[in-house]
Image (cartoon, grey):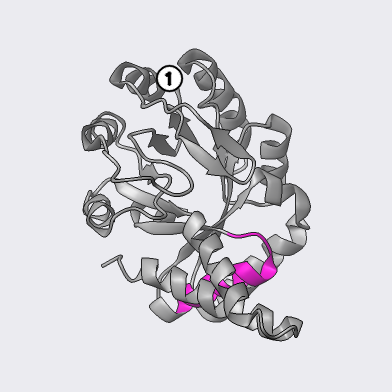
Amino acid sequence: MSDILKDKHFAFNVWDFESAKAVIDAGARCNKDVILQTSALIYKRIAAKSFLMFVKEYSIEKGIRAWLNLDHCKEKELLMDAVDNGWDMIMADGSSYNVEKNIEFVNDISKYAHERGVLVEGEVGQIIGTEDDINVIKECVASKEDIKNFVGQTEVDFIAVAFGNAHGEYVGVPSFRYDLIDYTIEISNKPFVVHGASGMPKVALDKLLGIQGVKKINISTDIKKAYRRGIKKANINLQPIKISSSIYEEVVKEAMSKLELIK
């Protein structure tokens, strides 16, 4: 588990075996390890044990490491199920609660996960936007007080905070609170997670990658847009294999474009 804590990784949301294969292949071509994320909605729809077996065996075959993370989950039973099914990481998302209840929720699941060798990510403040079964309309940038309380009273392995980032697509030029990232890393000494990295201006993404404590950067919407491009490129051909191949190629290309940013 140590490599996932100390190195920088892009984490890509996937939805089935084929998208997982495409991201792993992208990682192999770039010689970079990858994190595959399943939303709570996707987790409920896949055959978890078979999916885990495929990801682990295929990544070994391709010569890289691929970890599995259950992303943005608010359901205790589902989080525990992912732990029991061998997921490497879980995100216990209590960000919609006040900080006291968030701490209680995260600590409750962290004990169960840590006893079984599974890493836990927590989040302070709510990140605006829509993604799978997440729909946050009102932005709630984290306060330093809430970050301090969360850090001091939880044992999370990764920490995310709302710093002006957003799920989905950005409208206009985003204004990021880099001071909150620096503050969180300084007082926690924990790997920092950037949510909503899809569609970020390259200058912002480069700056985030240049921050030593930023270790995990999440990409979801850009992978879905690659899926859509694949369908559009193949829409004159109704053969399923042609459509699947086109989607695969676009997802590989998109994942590689992100992985190549890690120096």
The residue positioned 45% from the left and 70% from the top of the image is 254
112 sits left or right of 137 in the view: right
The percent coordinates of residue 168 (x first, y second) are 48, 48
Query: In the figure, 58 relative to 40: above or below?
Result: below
Foreground residue, 43 or 6? 43
Q: Can residue 253 be seen in this view?
A: yes
How many neighbours does mark 1 have within 10 angstroms: few (below 14), some (14-19), or many (20 or more)?
few
The percent coordinates of residue 231 (x first, y second) are 62, 73
Query: In the figure, 24 relative to 115: above or below?
Result: below
Type of residue at label 1?
Answer: Gln
Query: In the figure, 113 relative to 97: above or below?
Result: below
Majority SS type along the magenta span: helix
Q: Mark 1 points at which residue?
A: 153
Give the magenta-colored segment's residue range.
14-28
Image quadrant where residue 51 sits: bottom right
The residue positioned 78% from the left and 58% from the top of the image is 47
The percent coordinates of residue 41 (x first, y second) are 69, 46
Foreground residue, 76 or 125? 125
243 part of magenta stretch: no
The percent coordinates of residue 38 (x first, y second) are 62, 52
| Mark 1 residue element | helix
Quadrant assignment for the C terminus: bottom left
Query: In the figure, 218 relative to 17: above or below?
Result: above
